[in-house]
Amino acid sequence: MQWNSLNSLFIKIFISFWLLILLLTTVLILIPKLDGRQLQSITTSDFKSLKNQQQRIQKFIERHPNITHKQLIHLDPRRTLRSVYLTDLSGRLINDRAPRKMRQFILDSQSPNKPLKKVHKRKTYLGPIQIIHNQQPLLLYFSYPNQKESLELIEWLIDNPLLLLFTALLVSTPLCAFLAWHLTQPLRQLQDVANKVAQGELDTSFPVIKNSDEITQLASSMKLMVLSVKNMLNNQQRLLSDISHELRSPLTRLGLALAINKKRAGESKELQRIELEIERIELMIAEMLNLSRMQLSPEYKEDIALNEFLEELFLDAEFEANENGKTFIYPVLDSITINIYPELAYSAIENIIRNAIKYAEKTISIEITINKKEIILSIKNDGPLIPESELSNIFRPFYRLNESRERETGGAGLGLSIAENAMFKHGGKIWAENIDKQVCMHLQFPRFS
């Protein structure tokens, strides 16, 4: 495997994967850091604020030496802006009541030598710092309103780890979707081209893929492959045309010589046999050219109503069957639309119906199955059954199930092969089976291109 530095598809996927992992890991690590509810060391400004509060209360105590602890709390001159809380050195709260968050903060921070801070959504808590009242050391805490609320969403996510994980996945989904779309878009374009080429449209133009990675190399290889296949098929067509021309010239002279000989010597079994073989060779050449033309056909698909497409074909088949003393049965045709190559589809169905009429004893019947994705024509006849081991072989070019029967009925052994090629070009398939003592040929057409 050769990589072209950072333009390699492998490198792109590898780097994108690890960048996404790094991004998610970074987010998951940093989000808890944004939680203001974590205990924090106080800043210089916080310490100054705490010290000022301590000095104000200490001066208030000096001016009112007989004030009690609880009166001290309620007589704080700045109580409208700040809430004051006092505890003894053991952490027992002197206030009658305190919010749950303040009580938790008092439990977490009890060292006056190392005051801490905790920021919640609406309030910030500071403390402790020591004051002296009635010769008793007390710990002072206070809270004040935040100028702006803390990140409530961050706190909510941290409190709900599963929601945090879901949010991380939700945020990463668009990034993954964009990456997947970016990497698969040229592959989808190549898939469309490959589907068209598989249906015989060898002149399909390839998309321009600007990235110099493995996909671009794949597109170039596919383009060369299609060009090579196109050249080989053109050479095959040219070869068949040359062969048919070279064969038809001596066949024409042979037919002329045969006609002259019949005039001179009259009819004989030998001359009749020679005439039959000449006709068979001419038919074989015509069917070979027809098969080659079908493989290289530049036709385009059309949307045609099923009843419009099949009605005339079934009427002709009914007339031919009646002329041979046989019954041709077909259902009422639906007006549903089918996407097909008209000439190829007509040729495939006609070949199968003519075979059925040729070998049927009395009855040829048609069944049509329609579903969301496909339309299946099942053509049955009550003629001799095909051995199970031969059901797949009958579609091979020039294959004859019964040599003597083929010589009597005519044919070059290419009719079923032509039908199979037509079905492959449609993206469908053809197969045979014996059902209820009848030979049944199934032709499956995709409903949409």
Image (cartoon, rainbow, N blue to C red):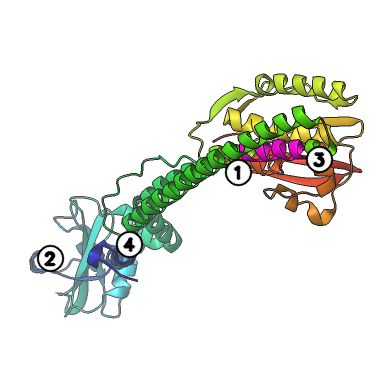
Real-space Cα separation, disc 2 to disc 3, in angstroms: 123 Å
Real-space Cα separation, disc 3 to disc 1, in angstroms: 42 Å
Provide the residue span drawn in magenta: 274-286
Q: The residue tagged with tag 4: helix, strand or loop? A: helix
Real-space Cα separation, disc 4 to disc 1, in angstroms: 34 Å
Say which label, 1 or 2, has the lower sequence index: 2
The residue mark sitting in front, 2 or 4, is 4
Q: Dots 2 and 4: beta carbons under 8 Å?
A: no
Q: Which residue is mark 2?
A: 46
Magenta: main secondary structure equals helix
Say which label, 2 or 4, has the lower sequence index: 4
In the figure, residue 316 lies in which quadrant?
top right
Q: The residue tagged with tag 3: helix, strand or loop? A: helix
The residue mark sitting in front, 2 or 3, is 3
**The N terminus: image quadrant:** bottom left
The amino acid beneath tag 4 is Leu
Real-space Cα separation, disc 3 to disc 4, in angstroms: 71 Å
Q: The residue tagged with tag 1: helix, strand or loop? A: helix
In the figure, residue 382 lies in which quadrant?
top right
Indicate whether residue 277 is drawn in magenta: yes
Residue 367: % across, % down: 79, 32
Q: Residues within 10 Å of mark 4 (few under 14, many from 20)?
A: some
Real-space Cα separation, disc 1 to disc 2, in angstroms: 82 Å
Q: Residue at x 20, y 53 (%)?
A: 146
- For the question of whether residue 64 can be seen, the reply is no
User: Is 371 in front, or is 28?
Assistant: 371
Residue 70: % across, % down: 26, 64
Q: Which residue is mark 4?
A: 9
Q: Which residue is mark 3?
A: 270
The residue mark sitting in front, 3 or 4, is 3
Q: Which mark is residue 424?
A: 1
